[in-house]
Amino acid sequence: MSGHSKFANIKHKKEKNDAAKGKIFTRIGREIAVAVKEGGADPANNSKLRDVIAKAKSNNMPNDTIDRSIKKAAGDANAANYEVAVYEGYGPNGTAIIVETLTDNKNRTASNVRNAFTKGGGNVGTPGCVSFMFDKKGQIIIDKEECDKEADDLMMIALDAGAEDFAEEEDSFEVVTDPDEFSKVREALEEAGIPMVSAQVTMIPQTYVELTDEQDVKMMNRILDLLDEDDDVQEVYHNWDE
């Protein structure tokens, strides 16, 4: 795991997102719509909605935009009915890729995802073909510069709230939780006034693959860029050690 800085990856991803705010807000808007449909429009009674709101805020989504998205989802009976569809496959040199989508047209999404893999020299596999190489976990990343708590104090808050693991890296802290405990741990950190760079349930690779061939790197980036451009794609997980 050494040398693989999740914080650096998240910062890089955020910088890319800052350049495409509209796209990231659209994606979070879809997540809000699904959360409201599943559990109602009151965040106090809907932990999934609370988690999406926290994600929205960590991506600098304005409060009025969040409120509008919730009201729209609650009041629009004719809103698009988004379904979750997950695709798994392989990139260059056997890299494992998982693509999570929210779509109102599965045929369109499946075609676009397949196209992204093909253009990058990869291929979509069968469900479950690579997910066994990942662990589904809640992951919270905290920037050391923004956090005024000592590592031990932070660790105790996280573990007392139900976190599984706490790690200190050069520039950040990482809190890992069981997916079912994620909301509780995130809220405990929020109540303690701890700023979070990233907080979400994610797929963490058990091992990472290095790409040393320049063409492989180029093709892998091609797959990731095409998936990133697709409005139906919510999250992409992979085990490439960038």
Image (cartoon, helix red, strand yellow):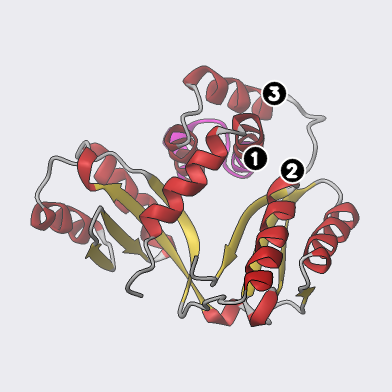
Q: Which contiguous range is marked in magenta?
A: 30-47
Task: Look at mark 3 in the image and give the residue it sits on.
Answer: 75
Question: Mark 1 and mark 3: span between their CA atoms?
Answer: 19 Å
Q: Which of 185 and 172 lies nearest the eye of the viewer?
A: 172
Q: Is residue 235 above or below residue 20?
A: below
- At label 2, the amino acid type is Asp
Q: Mark 3 falls on what kind of element? A: helix
User: Is residue 173 in the magenta section?
Assistant: no
Q: Position of residue 211 (x, y in %)?
A: 57, 75
Q: Mark 2 falls on what kind of element? A: loop
Please tell me which residue is depicted at 28% across the width and 68% down the height of the picture.
164
Position of 158 with respect to 76 (left or right) is: left
- At label 3, the amino acid type is Gly
Please tell me which residue is depicted at 78% across the width and 72% down the height of the picture.
121
Q: How many marks?
A: 3
User: Is residue 45 in the magenta section?
Assistant: yes
- Residue 39's tag is none
Q: Mark 1 falls on what kind of element? A: helix
Question: Mark 3 and mark 2: span between their CA atoms?
Answer: 23 Å
Q: Nearer the viewer, mark 1 or mark 3?
A: 1
- Residue 231's tag is 2
- The N terminus sits in image quarter: bottom left
Please tell me which residue is depicted at 41% across the width and 60% down the height of the picture.
138
Residue furthest toward the top?
64
Few, some or many residues within 10 Å of mark 3 (<14, 14–19, 20+):
few
Q: Is residue 181 above or below residue 14?
A: below
Q: Position of residue 227 (x, y in %)?
A: 72, 54
Question: Mark 1 and mark 2: span between their CA atoms?
Answer: 7 Å
